[in-house]
Image: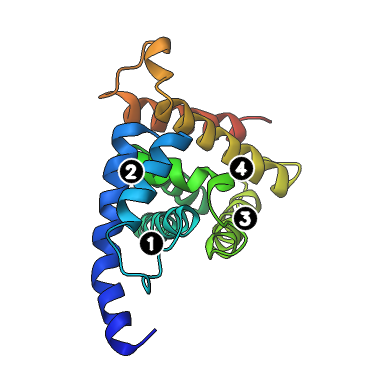
Amino acid sequence: MSVAERAQDALLRPALMRAAISLIKEGGINSDSVRQAAEQVIATTEPSHSLKSQSDLLTAIAEEAMSSLVTALQGAILDASHSSALNQCRAAGHAFLRWTYDNPVHFQVMSSHSLFDFKGSSLAESYEQIRIGLKRLITAAAADGDLYCVSVEDTLLSARAFLYGLARMNLDGQLPGWGVTHDGALETMQRLFDSYLFRLRRAF
């Protein structure tokens, strides 16, 4: 790719991704809507463009999503850095839930590993960095006596499952069936996560 082509790619790429996200938002993540989004977006590009397939397009969106999520988590932890490790865990959990609430399409694409090149993307490394950072906070919270856990790894996994489960229920439109409106979903999810942390703290 020439310098001119790289410059064009840098200019077009964000616009093409926004167009694809809009199409996915309208049609969902099912195969037909994803294929339609990819075909419409790729049809407008030059052959030299970096987004040459459905997988390329969704990988780019997923990587953009992860970058945004990492920024949100880092900002929340930094804002709570004057407080305890447990409060930093809480802040990270709240930030994750807010990010998924505010960015449903990005969350949906990022969670659909079978639809893009996960192994060839930067996501695996980013996931590992998030896991390492949260493990450090959970370890510190346990050392402070603020959090009871037999196994840091088990606590990390259970917290991840709890947060992801809530976020996925909201994304899939399941929360109204439990009496939670869309407008009240974020507050409810964050409150439930606080309750989850409280139970860990008060386990023994």
Q: Position of residue 21 (x, y in %)?
A: 31, 47
Decide which of tag 1 and tag 3 comes sooner along the chain: 1
Q: Secondary structure at mark 3?
A: helix
Q: Which residue is mark 4?
A: 147
C-alpha separation, residue under disc 3 versus residue under disc 4? 13 Å
Which residue occupies the foreground of this view, 136 or 66? 66
Q: Quadrant of the N terminus?
A: bottom left
Neighbour class for label 1 at 10 Å: few (<14), some, many (≥20)? some
In the rendered structure, the answer to whether residue 27 lies left or right of residue 120 reads left
Decide which of tag 2 and tag 4 comes sooner along the chain: 2
Residue 146 occupies which quadrant of the picture?
top right
Q: Which residue is mark 1?
A: 78
Labelled pair 3, 2 in contact (Cβ < 8 Å): no
C-alpha separation, residue under disc 2 versus residue under disc 4? 30 Å
Of the residues shown, which amino acid type is indicated by label 1? Leu
Q: Position of residue 36 (x, y in %)?
A: 37, 42
Decide which of tag 2 and tag 1 comes sooner along the chain: 1
Scheme by which the image is coloured: rainbow
Kindly report which numbered mark, 4 or 1, lies closer to the viewer in this rendering: 1
Q: Position of residue 81 (x, y in %)?
A: 41, 60
Decide which of tag 3 and tag 4 comes sooner along the chain: 3
- Residue at 75 percent across and 45 percent down: it is 151
Kindly report which numbered mark, 3 or 4, lies closer to the viewer in this rendering: 3
Q: Which residue is mark 3?
A: 135
Which residue occupies the foreground of this view, 129 or 15? 15
Which residue occupies the foreground of this view, 76 or 103? 103
C-alpha separation, residue under disc 1 versus residue under disc 3? 16 Å
Kindly report which numbered mark, 2 or 1, lies closer to the viewer in this rendering: 2
